[in-house]
Image (cartoon, grey):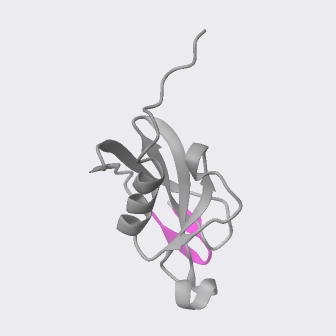
Amino acid sequence: MATCGQIRFSFVLVSARISANNMNMTLEPILVATGDDCEGRLVFRDGWLVAVLVQLSAQHDEQEGFWYLEKGFGALDGPDLPSFESLEQATAWIADHFNDAPPFTQPAA
């Protein structure tokens, strides 16, 4: 059981695997300590963490329910962090940003 703003809830951790632009992405549900905006997703590309998405709460008025890029890594790192109407839009945007990027490889020891 978790508390998110004034709401107490429990959820089952279910990862979603999607394929976009010939890459595999996994979205894992998490709770994020950002105040009322606490439902989130870790986004992995081919097993590498590339983004943290957070669903916006009612305090964001017309953007309530949108998904905000709380933090991006690699090709997603930058000062302008977008919001998306759905997880599908967010994952399509993420896939587009990695479209020309080579696959990740483990650094040499």
Q: Is residue 82 positioned above or below 49 on the image?
A: below
Q: Is residue 42 left or right of residue 59?
A: left
Which is the main secondary structure of the residues drawn in magenta?
A: strand
Nearer-the-camera pick, 82 or 33: 82
Q: Tell me which residue sits at (52%, 83%) in the image.
A: 64
Q: Is residue 109 magenta?
A: no
Number of numbered discs: 0
Nearer-the-camera pick, 93 or 46: 93
Residue furthest to the front: 100
Return the x and y of residue 77 as percentages of the image width and height.
Answer: 64, 51
Which region shows up in magenta? 2-10
Residue furthest to the top: 109
Q: Is residue 29 left or right of residue 61?
A: left
Q: Tell me which residue sits at (50%, 54%) in the image.
A: 30
Nearer-the-camera pick, 5 or 17: 17
Residue furthest to the right: 79
Q: Is residue 105 positioned above or below 72 on the image?
A: above
Return the x and y of residue 57 as percentages of the image width and height.
Answer: 57, 79
User: In the rendered image, which quarter is residue 31 located in?
Assistant: bottom right
Q: Tell me which residue sits at (39%, 36%) in the image.
A: 46
Quadrant where the C terminus lies? top right
Nearer-the-camera pick, 96 or 45: 96
Return the x and y of residue 36 as percentages of the image width and height.
Answer: 63, 74
